[in-house]
Image: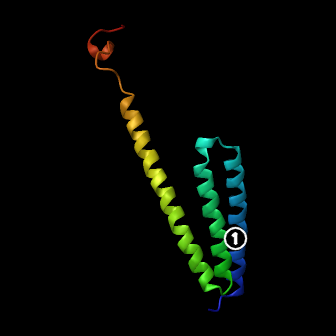
Amino acid sequence: MNIPVAARWALLALALLQFLLAVRALSRARRAGPGQRTGPLLDAADHGIGVVLATALAFPHGTLAFGAMILLGPVIVWKGVRDVRARREAKAGTGAAGPAAGDCGPAAGRPGV
């Protein structure tokens, strides 16, 4: 596969950006508490594998790029599952915070109470 020189430099620049994002995510994971580390660690894995993928695409290493894509799949799926669960929990949390059944207020016909 013949890749133009400009495309190789662009992919290497992308790999550098991904590396910087992975380092940032790892530092966030180090600062996070025990229950809050999964998200930053998944971000770090996503960006770290992205470094390998962009570098492998810049040079003719087809098997390395394929392996990186195989590793990236479960990370992206896991991040998606976490996002869906977080949305469901947020939606369930807002529904439970409504007014109580015996609430006395202006809507109950007692103004100013």
Is residue 35 found left or right of 9 in the rendered image?
Answer: left
Q: Name the residue under label 1.
A: 15
**x%, y% of residue 101?**
28, 20
Is residue 91 found left or right of 75 in the rendered image?
Answer: left
**x%, y% of residue 73?**
51, 68
Res 96 → quadrant: top left
Residue placed most toward the observer, 47 or 37:
37
Which color scheme is applied? Answer: rainbow
Question: The N terminus appears in which quarter of the rendering?
Answer: bottom right
- Residue sitting at 50 percent across and 58 percent down? 78
**x%, y% of residue 38?**
58, 50
- Residue sitting at 65 percent across and 85 percent down? 61
Q: Which amino acid does label 1 sit on?
A: Ala
Residue placed most toward the observer, 59 or 63:
63
- SS state under label 1: helix
**Above or below: residue 98 compared with residue 105:** below
Q: Tag 1: Cα neighbours inside 10 Å, few (<14), some, or many (≥20)?
A: many
- Residue sitting at 60 percent across and 63 percent down? 46
**Above or below: residue 20 compared with residue 54:** above
- Residue sitting at 59 percent across and 74 percent down? 68
**Above or below: residue 93 compared with residue 107:** below
